[in-house]
Amino acid sequence: MADLGSNMVDKSAFVLGLLVSVAEARAALVEEGGIPVLVEIVEVGTQRQKEIAVAILLQLCEDCLAYRTMVAREGAIPPLVALSQTGTSRAKQKVKNLHTRNYPLHQCPHYFILHLEIL
């Protein structure tokens, strides 16, 4: 997935999107350095790749404070905000879903919530 020039990014992102519903797969994704790759895809991938990457980030952020913190610290906020404004309607909805999960304030870095508030 890290080789954005390859034709395997769409396929591997799709498969990862299916696997990320399993806790062990989420842990492996994080351990293998997948968060920076997903953030890069949100920044420079195709529209379809961006949609898949946001969906994966959403699943990572759902149940784990540590993963939410890692995603925010990796710099995901600016590209997510940009995608919420310029992406496809499907991508915009996925970014909105990240925002509307209403994570308790004590479980999210304050900058994560503040940046998503503008959505």
Image: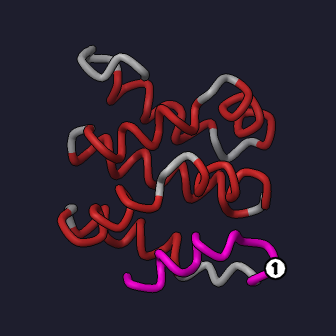
**Nearest the camera: 63 or 32?**
32
Q: Nearer the viewer, residue 112 or 42?
A: 112
Q: Quadrant of the C terminus?
A: bottom left
Residue at image location 52% in from the left, 41% down from the top = 17
- The answer to whether residue 77 is above or below residue 73 is below
Query: Hey, which quadrant is residue 93 in on the image?
Result: bottom left
Color theme of the render: secondary structure
Q: How many residues crowd around disc 1 within 10 Å: few (fewer than 14), some, or many (20 or more)? A: few
Give left or right: position of 18 versus 24. Answer: left
Q: Position of residue 61 (x, y in %)?
A: 66, 59
Provide residue 28's location: percent of width, then percent of height.
73, 28
Q: Secondary structure at mark 1?
A: helix
Q: Quadrant of the N terminus?
A: top left
**Residue placed under numbered mark 1 in the picture:** 106
Looking at the image, which residue is at 77% across and 36% down? Answer: 27
Please state the horizontal and vertical placement of residue 6, each as a whole percent of the image.
27, 14
Q: Residue at coordinates 31% horizontally, 45% vertically from top-left?
A: 43
Up/down of 33 relative to 91, above or below: above
In the rendered view, does 4 fall on the left or right side of 18? left
Q: Quadrant of residue 80?
A: bottom left
83 sits to left or right of 1: left
- Is residue 111 found inside the magenta-colored segment of the image? yes
**For residue 45, above or below residue 63:** above
Residue 71 image point, x, y percent: 60, 51
Amino acid residing under circle 1? His
Is residue 93 inside the magenta stretch? no
Residue at the (44%, 54%) spot, across then down: 54
Q: Nearer the viewer, residue 66 or 115?
A: 115
| Chain part drawn in magenta | 105-119
Between 26 and 4, the one lying in front of the other is 4
